[in-house]
DNA sequence: ATCTCCTACTTAAACGCTTAAGTATATTCT
DNA sequence: AGAATATACTTAAGCGTTTAAGTAGGAGAT
């Protein structure tokens, strides 16, 4: 087993103490070092192929340069990473931004027997991003221990923690209002589970608001919710096709659901947008490639990731003093799945 | 700044030495400890909310329980994580398997100024999985230092490293042969860049083999390659529509490309499968939800992830002695995008 | 009563790094 | 010439664990 070369080896090779090596590696300006010593040490580093051990540095420094990203694999019915390329892009951009600042991303699903709070503490994370999960009651421990924490797409009570959300309610409103402006009055709503306060519930509020502002009563049978998946979409589509008073439009809170709905409707002989108009949410790749292409509420994964990083860095600099709750704007991308009637 | 409680605190609280606390936490059977001491220590741990620092443990142990996953964000033309939910599922499953064995996943894109070899060494990773990248010449350093390493979807020269691949060539053959059996003879091939030996090149070989076995000559103009993306697919679709002798079928090496092609063809007034048959690769979510649904070469992301973990664990146990090169089988999922002529 | 062997601990070094404090030599100032 | 200052280092403690080796006290054997 080849011995992993460390600072001591460099120090010996260059004929200096490990402290000197450390000073040189960290380019500390408060410590003067002779140019030829620097050269000698750098040569030794190159010769022996030395790479610093960040774990050891972390212990001495109390900074791991490790950021956790906790993202549930089986959230209220959705398989985020698996079926939603939106989060794929979010992760990719977040990782890149962090890496460029010298941080590494530790990715974790939701663990049944270990909360993200424990993860953050045992790995001594320098920060943690939690997606789509409620604030654990232990979460305040993280702030007490000064571990930066940003919630993404999680609706929290109060504003004790930094968070990044989108205008979910406005998004629901935007979608439904657009349908109404196109002459629709019987509008179904299909979403993930509405069990707790979360993005689905918010979007549902927006939907309801648009209806009531236009004097349209909410019909319970028009509200369907289940697992955010293609297959549940199909099921919902079939249910909608079978309704006595069939909706002329459907608002789905995810593109993936919308595609399923499209398929479900089609299997019952109904076409989008001829028979039923459809509007989705996320406006990712799926919306673009659908046939017909899907009108959808657009959100920007890259922006969300960059903003998340910004809030994280802010907390690193100024501590818990700068808790911020950001709500990113949404827009409507009009494509071919809504028909004016 | 609240002081992070450590073993010393537990030791003091329970009136024992830190060694004893360590022995209790690690439940070492070679060290006998009085039951009431165990109780006292566990009580202290609970009372003070102690969580071990894995970084410090790693330093003492020389085991970080950290596995790296390096996945290029802008590989030969594709944006893997962003546009390919296949890799999303791969990552999710891999992470879960690792987590259940007590490992954490460190996710990294490809870094311009830091190879995965350096990452593995500086983070003292216990193992590393490299996706879609050639073996760095430094990669042998990892084996020398006994760091388990598995390449996924990377074609390497020789078999010095463990690897997980799929039967890419057979997949290309399978797809093309199926088209031929359905009466097609003018078959276009659309893929990511063919610059180096890799999955695209292998699939291209399979395509060529099926053609020649059936006495069909390869036509250079039928071979298109570019960025693996929806937009390149559209472009390719348009090019195909404009060919003097138009192909009656197209084999695309990614579902995402196939969908773009579908769109491109449609923009020129051609329908799938009426005018042009189409077959994709991956058979992920996109193939299923496409309209018409896409016949595609199926590969199993979860299996790939589990097998990867297995090779990694094998190397951890038995060292570099058990290098294995696995090639997972593929199958054809028949859907609605290929017409018999 | 002495020796050996358990049991149940403790001590202290080590893991690879950082950093405050110390030291030796050379340079500049008075 | 002696004091003050600057330069270029080294020493050693500390970060939070693990673990080999040591030790004290009691039980059992002789």
Image (cartoon, coloured by chain):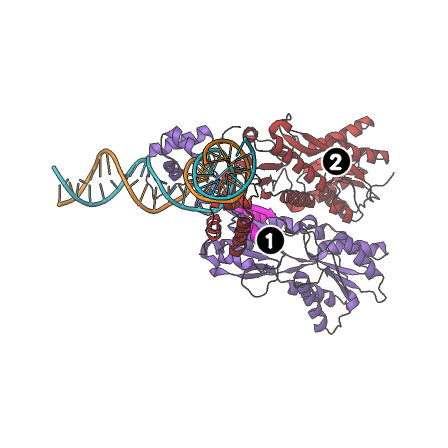
Chain colours: A red, B purple, C cyan, D orange
The residue wearing badge 1 is B115
Q: Position of residue A71 (x, y in %)?
A: 61, 40
From mark 2 to mark 1, how far is it between C-alphas?
A: 48 Å
- Residue sitting nearer the eye, B79 or A134: B79
Quarter of the view holding residue B265 = bottom right
Residue positioned most to the bottom? B215
Q: Secondary structure at mark 2?
A: strand
In this rendering, do the residues under marks 2 and 1 share a single chain? no
Is residue A63 depicted above or below B140 in this figure? above
The residue wearing badge 2 is A189
Q: Position of residue B341 (x, y in %)?
A: 79, 65
Residue range highlighted in magenta: B93-120
Q: Which mark is residue A208?
A: none
Residue positioned most to the top? A158
Tell me if mark 1 has few (under 14), some (14-19) or many (20+) residues whose alpha carbon lies within 10 angstroms of its own. some
Tell me if mark 2 has few (under 14), some (14-19) or many (20+) residues whose alpha carbon lies within 10 angstroms of its own. many
Residue A273 seen in the figure: yes
Is residue C24 depicted above or below B157 in this figure? above
Task: Say which quadrant the N terminus of chain A sits in.
Answer: bottom left
Q: Position of residue A335 (x, y in %)?
A: 82, 44
Q: Nearer the viewer, mark 2 or mark 1?
A: 1
Q: Residue at x 81, y 55 (%)?
A: B264
Is residue A340 depicted above or below B295 in this figure? above
- Residue sitting nearer the eye, A285 or A11: A11
- Residue sitting nearer the eye, B82 or B207: B82
The answer to whether residue A295 is left or right of residue A144 is right
The answer to whether residue A300 is left or right of residue A27 is right
């Amino acid at each position: 087993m080849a011995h992993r070369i460390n600072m001591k080896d460099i120090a010996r090779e260059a004929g200096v103490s490990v402290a000197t090596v450390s000073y040189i590696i960290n380019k500390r300006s408060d410590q003067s070092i002779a140019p030829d010593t620097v050269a000698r040490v750098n040569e030794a580093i190159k010769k022996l192929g030395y790479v610093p051990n960040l774990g050891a540095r972390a212990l001495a420094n109390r900074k791991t340069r490790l950021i956790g990203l906790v993202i549930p694999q089986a959230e209220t019915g959705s398989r985020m990473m698996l079926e939603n390329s939106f989060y794929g892009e979010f992760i990719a951009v977040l990782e890149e931004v962090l890496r460029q600042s010298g941080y590494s991303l530790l990715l974790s699903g939701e663990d049944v027997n270990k909360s993200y709070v424990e993860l953050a503490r045992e790995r001594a994370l320098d920060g943690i991003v939690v997606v789509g999960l409620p604030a654990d009651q232990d979460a305040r421990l993280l702030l007490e221990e000064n571990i930066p924490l940003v919630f993404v797409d999680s609706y929290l009570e109060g504003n004790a923690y930094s968070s990044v959300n989108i205008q979910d309610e406005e998004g629901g409103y935007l979608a439904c209002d657009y349908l109404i402006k196109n002459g629709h009055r019987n509008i179904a709503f299909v979403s993930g589970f509405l069990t707790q306060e979360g993005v689905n519930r918010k979007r549902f509020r927006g939907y309801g608001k648009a209806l009531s502002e236009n004097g349209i009563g909410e019909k319970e049978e028009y509200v369907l919710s289940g697992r955010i998946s293609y297959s549940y979409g199909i099921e919902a589509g079939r249910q909608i096709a079978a309704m006595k008073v069939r909706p002329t439009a459907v608002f789905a809170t995810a593109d993936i659901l919308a595609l399923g709905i499209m398929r479900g409707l089609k299997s019952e002989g109904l076409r989008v947008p001829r028979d039923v108009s459809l509007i989705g949410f996320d406006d990712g790749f799926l919306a673009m490639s659908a046939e017909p292409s899907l009108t959808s509420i657009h959100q920007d994964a890259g922006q969300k990731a960059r903003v998340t990083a910004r809030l994280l860095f802010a907390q690193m600099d100024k501590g818990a003093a700068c808790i911020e709750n950001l709500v990113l704007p949404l827009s409507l991308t009009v494509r071919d799945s809504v028909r004016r009637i």
